[in-house]
Image (cartoon, rainbow, N blue to C red):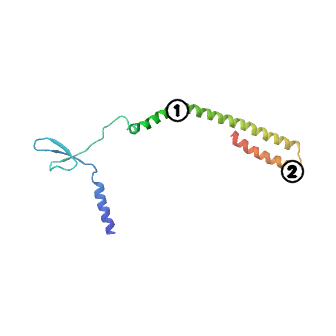
Amino acid sequence: MRYISKILIVFIMFYSLPGHAVYKCKDEKGAVTFSGIPCGSNAEIVTIRPKATNNTSNKKDFLTPQERADLRRYESRKPKRDSLDASLQKNDRDYYSESCKSAKMYQQDYKDELRTGCTASRCEQVKSNIKYWKRRVDRYCN
């Protein structure tokens, strides 16, 4: 337990030290120098603040020329992708609309057959088909 607490204390001491301290020093002639280590008793720690900018760092600045070309090509194709997406969505709506109509038609045909009368074995098959097309109606029409 003592061993662990000593390690913890040492860790806290090193963790709390500033990682990149900059010291400002003046020599006898009045020249100002900046250093990573204290250069005398008159050294003072300087707080360096990042330059304030209106925009955040631009990720495009870190791309290679090939990656920039790929990104430009990708962005130039966006209108085409959007129109294809819209077309696919329309096709999906049309598909579900047609499937809904067909499923309702088949379901109604089997209901009519059941209502007009059928043999015992055929009636079981018709009831099964009605259930099948009911599931399809629920899937495509809702």
At label 1, the amino acid type is Lys
Sort mark 2 into few (<14), some (14-19) or many (20+) by Cα contacts within 10 Å: few
The residue at 12%/44% (across/down) is 27
The residue at 17%/48% (across/down) is 43
Q: Quadrant of residue 84?
A: top right
Residue 5 versus residue 103 in the image, above or below = below
The quadrant of the rendering that contains the C terminus is top right
**Closer mark to the observer between disc 1 and disc 2:** 1
Lower sequence index among marks 1 and 2: 1
Q: According to the image, label 2 marks what residue?
A: 121
Secondary structure beneath label 2: helix
Q: Quadrant of residue 61?
A: top left
Q: x, y percentage for residue 39? A: 17, 49
Q: According to the image, label 1 marks what residue?
A: 78
Measure how far apart labels 1 and 2 are at the Cα level.
58 Å
The quadrant of the rendering that contains the N terminus is bottom left
